[in-house]
Amino acid sequence: MERPWLALYPQEIPHTIDYPQKPLQQFLKEAAEQFPNKVAIHFLGKELTYQEVYEQSLKLAHYLRRIGLEKGDRVSIMLPNCPQSVISYYAVLFAGGIVVQTNPLYTERELEHQLNDSGAKIIITLDLIFPKAIKMKAVTNLKHIIVTSIKDYLPFPKNILYPFVQKKQQPVAVKVKHEGECHLFTKAIATSNAEEYSVDVNPLEDVALLQYTGGTTGFPKAAMLTHHNLIANTLMCAKWMYKCQKGNESILGVLPFFHVYGMTAVMNLSIMEGHKMILLPKFDVVTTLKTIEKQRPTLFPGAPTIYIALLNHPDLKKYDLSSIKICISGSAPLPVEVQEQFEAVTGGKIIEGYGLTEASPVTHANFIWDGKRIKGSIGVPWPDTDAMIVSLETGEKANVNEIGEIAVRGPQVMKGYWNQPEETEAVLRDGWLLTGDLGYMNEEGYFFVVDRKKDMIIASGYNIYPREIEEVLYEHPKVQEAVVIGVPDAYRGETVKAYIVLKEGEQCTEEELDQFMRSRLAAYKVPRIYEFRKELPKTAVGKILRRTLLEEEKEKQK
């Protein structure tokens, strides 16, 4: 296969990588041997060394085996970013289980579906979520609930004060006893040993993780990601950031680990390279700004909405963000305006990457230091990753600059969907993963995403791509966030509607925006409807929920 992008690679980035044939958890053991006393996790003032994380992961693994976990059993981890989420993840792998990452914000309905679909026997969760989890025992195969609290890994005196803060925020106190099928995380570790033992793992075949997709249609599906998939993508990430020194960087963990991007680009990368993780349980603008100034992270993986929120905080100039060297932005398109502003504020590099859950998740990125960076491009495929554009008309490989569906192939591509052979067959063709994203490749080998296949708007016979319109809206000096959808129209079939969040203190009219857009876009692409909002619906990782807005519009049409 032709790979024009390889000619663009700086000499420091290899075209192919030698992937070690070992289980993912082995990297934690190696980090503990190489950096035993180095800080692995910083969490709201509490610090754990690599040796401590390794030993506690082994202890929890022993406990999981003691309560009946067997090789291949699934364990749900329903936690925010905290030391327990890292310890639990590696403990499940040490015990031979399969991790099921679960969003702590799930409703009972969503949690019930995921537990039943995965067949998870054990869940590790917060005390605040315990009432929801205990209900699942009656409607799923759940056997054991391991409960922890944020205070369990807070430093003194925060651990003493936390229950009082929690009581104000959550009037109903949750008390869990360590008995029967309910277990306290701290007791589980305290009553176990840290002896090493190994589980026979085939990295190429054995699934390490069930990662549920966003569920844009119906219920989410679980991508089966093997040990090899996760190791390959994490190593690719390390090679792409070739100027970073092993054991010498610190990564800000704002992206949740229950999202595959945060899991790979923060947690697994940190463990593999011996970096320090600076964890925040949720994204808060002021807390994030204070943490960057005080803890001085060098790497800051994020999503565009996170960077936008920081840039638009009125006190931004009061904080020193100069420690940040690299930001790889994922989960949604990075507006050019946001890229330029964030680089100006930090002095670091922010580049757009591309990927999807089914690819562990990264497949493309722009070059960070050397090599041409093209604005609006998702960059080029990573080492060992093939990509092509599939023609929408012929189903064959498209021509250069022709818009079609992006397809990818590489060692990071999933084994398939859990218990969904038909869905697997629909997206995996001869090793190629059909992404559902529309894009094109230019003559040099740079890729561009124009939109999700299902998000394309067809108005009066014209194909309209929301991303192009959103890019122009972000250029308007009063616009903080924007998203565009197609809404039903009796005459045009669909018409373009834009949802706008203005910057704090700004006022703007539809007429002003319309005039601005008409000076920059063909008339058929200009939004016919504008709706101003205080905020837009988002996922936990900050991706704007276009489908929620579409559902609202459908309700209005009834």
Image: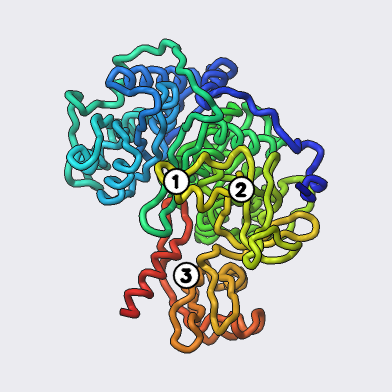
* Quadrant in the picture for the C terminus: bottom left
Residue 265 spot, x, y in % from top left: 56, 40
Q: Is residue 255 visible?
A: yes
Name the residue rendered at 64%, 59% in the picture.
Answer: 341
Residue corresponding to mark 3 = 501
Which residue is more in the foreground, 375 or 360? 360
Name the disc covering residue 432, or none.
2
When asked about the image quadrant of residue 58, the answer is top left
Q: Distance between the residues labelled 2 and 1?
A: 16 Å
What x and y, as percent, mark residue 368?
Answer: 71, 46
Residues tagged 2 and 1 counted as in contact (Cβ below 8 A): no
Kind of residue indicated by mark 3:
Val
Q: Which of marks 3 and 2 is in front?
A: 2
Residue underneath mark 1: 421
- Check disc 2 and give the amino acid type: Trp
Kind of residue at disc 1: Pro
Identity of the residue drawn at 70% across and 32% down: 17
Q: Which one is earlier in the sequence, the residue at label 3 or at label 1?
A: 1
- Bin the neighbour count of mark 1 within 10 Å (Cα to Cα): few under 14, some 14-19, many 20 and up: few
Which tag, 3 or 2, sits closer to the chain's start? 2
Q: Distance between the residues labelled 3 and 1?
A: 41 Å
Give the Cα distance between marks 3 and 2.
38 Å
Q: Which of marks 3 and 1 is in front?
A: 1
Q: Of marks 2 and 1, which one's residue comes earlier in the chain?
A: 1
Look at 33% across and 23% down and name the residue there: 69
Asked whether the residues under the numbered discs 3 and 2 touch, taking CB atoms below 8 Å apart as contact, a structural biologist would say no
Instruction: Please state the horizontal and vertical placement of residue 347, each as a whole percent of the image.
Output: 68, 49
Secondary structure under the numbered disc 1 in the rendered image: helix
Residue 378 percent across, percent down from the top left: 66, 55
Q: Residues within 10 Å of mark 2 (few under 14, many from 20)?
A: some
Label 2: state its secondary structure.
strand
Can see residue 189?
Answer: no
